[in-house]
Image: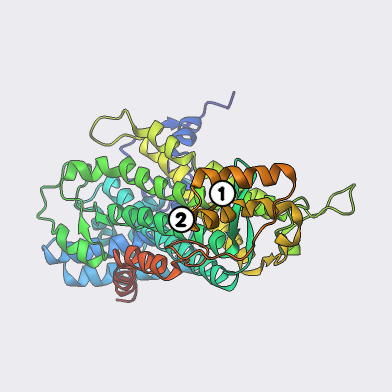
Amino acid sequence: MPQDTTHTIGTDTPQHAGETSPLWHKSTTMTEEIARFTIGRDRELDLLLADCDVLGSIAHTAMLTEIGMLTPAERDMLHTHLRHILTEIRQGRFAIADGVEDVHSQVELMLTRRLGDVGKKIHSGRSRNDQVALDIKLWTRHQLAATIRLVRQLFDTLQRQSEHYRHVLMPGYTHLQVAMPSSFGLWFGAYAEALADDMAMLTTAYRINDRNPLGSAAGYGSSFPLRRQRTTELLGFDTMAYNVVYAQMGRGKTERSVSSAIAAVAYTLSRLAFDACMYNSQNFAFIKLPDECTTGSSIMPHKKNPDVFELTRAKCNKLQALQAQVTLITNNLPSGYFRDMQVLKEVVMPAFSELHDCLRMTIYIIERVRVNEHILDDARYDNMFSVETVNRLAAEGVPFRDAYRRVGLDIENGTFKPEKQLHHTHEGSIGNLCNEQIRQRMDREMAAIDLTRAEEAEQRLAEG
């Protein structure tokens, strides 16, 4: 059992009396073990939120000045030092000191040390509840924007490969049995269109997330005449979460929409990875993965294992469980804020970097994969052209069932001779991939959001 030592949070690095205490400190003492348990991974994850926390404080103090809670001189001092802190964060020099609970406390502590009582005014009209909700929304907005751009990069790569290999035929499978002719144009293009569906979910999640919770305070608003529309504009949000109770209840619901979008992309990547691993194996030999994305065996000199795509498949399958985690953490909570929300950070925030790694690896491989252009020289695939022969006979006037029976008997007797010239013309088929229409759909999905509005607003806050 850990030693049960009581201490006052924040007293181990004192500068002035009480200055390193958490924002909620009122001479409360707790054991170190309880402090460790309740803080959890906040100090670690809050370093990722630090940039967003400072930007939120710049917008908040600008609004406080407009309603008379700060003087212009106080605002200017705060903004100068907040931007200094932002520079430290972006240069990797920012840290949450021992005894300081979270990023909010650290930023306020730094301002108080540098500006005295002016630094203590920064929290007027805020609660840690809406402050952390804002930080998470801003951070998630960044992560979703990065995800959207990576998905678009993979989409474009798949479409280029679809066009490049549009005439290279390959077997299509049902039940893992050779079925009908397909093509690499279709195979690459199918995953591109899947990503267009995934983009619809990503942009929906972006819009749900793109609502400002700042000013909801602890979930019931404030008696200060806050101008929430002003901070919404300053921070580049599309709109605000209007109802202050829902601004807090939206935590969990937003994460559910985000986790659904992450899972959708992960689902597509995991299926693509499975196909690639299978098609790369010697029994198929349809494609060859880049050598640097494979590993050898400690005992079998001939092995080249598709480790990168196997890990991608496993990681993406794990990411699809994120929805269930978010749901189980939050689905039986009543209205209002609860500390349960803290655990959401621990499951959702790491998911983005894992998904981004998988997307980058997939882009790398798809750009470099080599395609076997002579698969159908192997006679084992001749029978997949049987439907082509049935359709030709039917087009010549033979009843379809008679044509089907005739070709079936030829196959059984070993007399079937395939005709490998294909004439598929309908939309989405081998001869008419509709890649341009799919690209237009992707463009429409991406046009539903404005990534530059948020980026430009944050740049203005950062630069002054």
- Residue 109 found in image quarter: bottom left
Asked whether residue 135 is in view, the answer is no
Does residue 141 appear to the left or right of 337 in the view shown?
A: right
Up-down relation of residue 152 to residue 312 (above or below): below
Does residue 292 appear to the left or right of 7 in the view shown?
A: right
Which residue is the site of mark 1? 271
Does residue 284 appear to the left or right of 438 in the view shown?
A: right
Q: Position of residue 124 (x, y in %)?
A: 20, 53
Observer-nearest of 312 and 376: 376
Residue at image coords 40%, 45%: 260
Q: CA distance from mark 2 to mark 1?
A: 11 Å
Residue at image coords 58%, 73%: 164
Which residue is the site of mark 2? 194
Q: For mark 1, does the 10 Å Cα neighbourhood hold few (<14), some (14 to 19), or many (20 or more) residues?
A: some
Q: Position of residue 416 (x, y in %)?
A: 70, 51
Q: Is label 2 in contact with label 1 (beta carbons under 8 Å)?
A: yes
- Residue 406 found in image quarter: top right
